[in-house]
Image (tube, coloured by chain):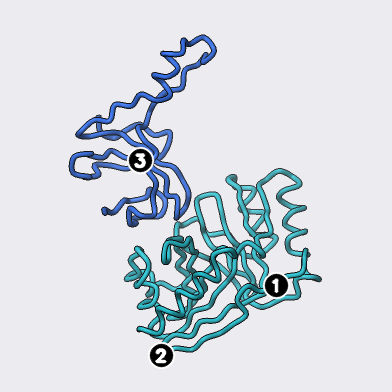
Chain colours: A blue, B cyan
Amino acid sequence: MFLINCPYCGERDQSEFSAGGEAHIIRPKQPTELSDDQWAEFLFMRKNIKGVQLERWNHAHGCRKWFNMVRDTSNDKIHAVYKMGEKPPIK
Amino acid sequence: MLNYNSPIMNAKDYSGIKISEVEPIIKINLRGKNRDFITKIGKELSIIPPTDSNTSSGNEKLNILWLSPDEWLVYSNDKIDLKNNNSLEDRLFDQISKVKLGSVANVTDHWVMINLKGDNVFELLSSGCPFNFNDFKNSKGAVTQTLLNHVDVIIHNKNINDLNLFVRRSFSNHLWSWMNDSARFI
């Protein structure tokens, strides 16, 4: 259980949010030209790291907006939240 | 519009809490992004949709609640005859949806409005809600969307200890039962 600072609504409980997985995964420009392995790589393979990760989250029970988050997966410390389309404030 | 059947049709009085369903009132969902959309809504309703998060604006007839940066809920203060009162929806539809400024959806049957009054309303809400009401309860006109007993709700702080709570119709009976059950122990 932790608090998330929604960029639109402010600080809310984690139970109002849904996690959307790793952020900034670029969709291939020509999916039809990819092999099955390359397509599966884009579709399913995620880093799942222990440490600071860039993630997508959705305020599902609030404003229903998607946003990005920099979160340490080992201790749930949130380093930053930023809107969709913005660049990550931390590398 | 089809015949409107109220799902609850009840009012209860507990120590420091009065709960009642307020229906039928008109509810309209508005979605749009650009400046023309906001201006048009302001002209039609004589209320500017609030752009600050978790706030509302209103006059003696209507309220507009901020739901997200591009979404608002309009509802009427007074009960109305829904069979003979689609003029607001029609007017907004003509001015906004038809000219593709945004979307107008009549959600009168989608949401059920429950009014909560009394000194203990926030005690009741806090018993099943993850939201921190400390600042909310002192700011008149504040709006929040959150979970109450795992059910999505919109809460409008109309006045001090006087709230309007919107719940989806299919969840309304369940939430009504939960609120009555919880209110007995406060």
Please tell me whether mark 2 sits on a helix, a strand or a loop.
Answer: loop
Q: Residue at x 26, y 33 (%)?
A: A53
Rounded to the nearest angstrom, the CA distance separating label 2 from label 3 is 44 Å
- Tell me the amino acid under the disc marked 2: Ser
Circle 2 sits on which residue? B15
Residue count near mark 3 (Cα–Cα under 10 Å), binned few <14, some 14–19, many ≥20: some
- Dot 1: chain letter: B
Q: Which mark is residue A82?
A: 3
Rounded to the nearest angstrom, the CA distance separating label 1 from label 3 is 44 Å
Residue B88 position, x and y percent, is: 74, 64
- Dot 3: chain letter: A
Please tell me whether mark 3 sits on a helix, a strand or a loop.
Answer: strand
Q: Which mark is residue B61?
A: none
- Tell me the amino acid under the disc marked 1: Asn
| Residue closer to the observer: B141 or B166 | B166
Q: Is residue B115 left or right of residue B79?
A: left
Q: Which mark is residue B5?
A: 1
Task: Tell me, yes or no, whether dots 1 and 3 are on the same chain.
Answer: no
Nearer mark to the viewer, of 2 and 1:
1
Q: Is residue B35 left or right of residue A24?
A: right
Q: Is residue B21 left or right of residue B94?
A: left
- Tell me the amino acid under the disc marked 3: Tyr
